[in-house]
Image (cartoon, grey):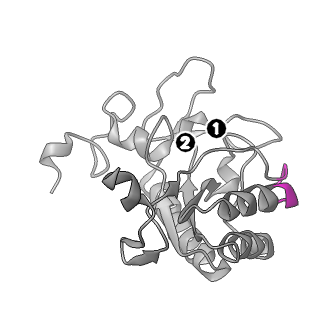
Amino acid sequence: MIAWKRLFEPGRIGGMRVKNRIIMPPMGTDYASEDGYVTQRQIDYYAERAKGGVGLIIVGAACVQSSAGKAFQQIVVDDDKYLPGLSQLAESIKKNGARAAIQLHHAGNATRITKGLQQPVAPSSLPRRSYELAHALTLAEIKEIISCFIEGALRCRKAGFDAVEIHSAHHYLLAEFLSPAWNERTDEYGGDIQTVS
């Protein structure tokens, strides 16, 4: 009973003050438009969850590099043209009492080649059942993707989000870099994680 009551006490997550300790984790909704814009359906969906009393909502899987494709119908954050919708989304969450965060995502070799998008990318070019063969990223391309994450985070901050989460789980790009099953690189972005300084 005491632990349950503590959920509803105000607290801090990182340096951010939150009205309670209840967090809605990020999840894919497929509610974005085909070209990555926030839709009214998405705004309404998150506004309703904020009204429900959650302290922090993390919007799921916003694509940081649309030129590399998306894994599904998701928000894109790689251009200022997306700012109006992102701002409306953050505002709808916050005006209904919750803090707003957004998860930044790159699909890596889970990207589907559709609508003329480039070949999927990954740390190493390894076959993966049911997916296209990925192109092994060059050092320059890795630096470009790092910049995409940074610029995406800054854009989300400008749109009014309180925080970002970096998606490095499941089978997407950052998880691929962390997995010896998908990362056979011998440069500074590969090798045994224990020996990396």
Q: In this rendering, would 18 be left or right of 96?
A: left
Residue 37 at least partly seen: no
| Residue toward you, 68 or 85 | 85
Q: CA distance from mark 2 to mark 1?
A: 6 Å
| Residue toward you, 129 or 23 | 23
Within the image, what quadrant is residue 36 found in?
bottom right
In the displayed structure, would residue 52 be above or below residue 193?
below
- Near mark 2 (Cα within 10 A), the count class, few <14, some 14-19 or many ≥20, is many
* Residue at 47% from the left image edge and 67% from the top image edge: 20
Residue 26 at least partly seen: yes
Question: Can you name the residue that lies furthest to the front here?
Answer: 1
The x, y position of residue 13, in whole percent, is 39, 69
Q: Which residue is mark 1?
A: 111
Amino acid beneath label 2: Gly
In the displayed structure, would residue 113 be above or below residue 3?
above
Amino acid beneath label 1: Thr
- Name the quadrant of the C terminus: bottom left
The x, y position of residue 158, in whole percent, is 63, 82
Q: Which residue is mark 2?
A: 108
Within the image, what quadrant is residue 53 found in?
bottom right
What is the secondary structure assignment of the residue under circle 2?
helix
The x, y position of residue 25, in whole percent, is 53, 51
Q: Which residues are magenta?
A: 33-41
Q: Are marks 2 and 1 in contact (CB under 8 Å)?
A: yes
The x, y position of residue 171, in whole percent, is 49, 34
- Near mark 1 (Cα within 10 A), the count class, few <14, some 14-19 or many ≥20, is many
What is the secondary structure assignment of the residue under circle 1?
loop
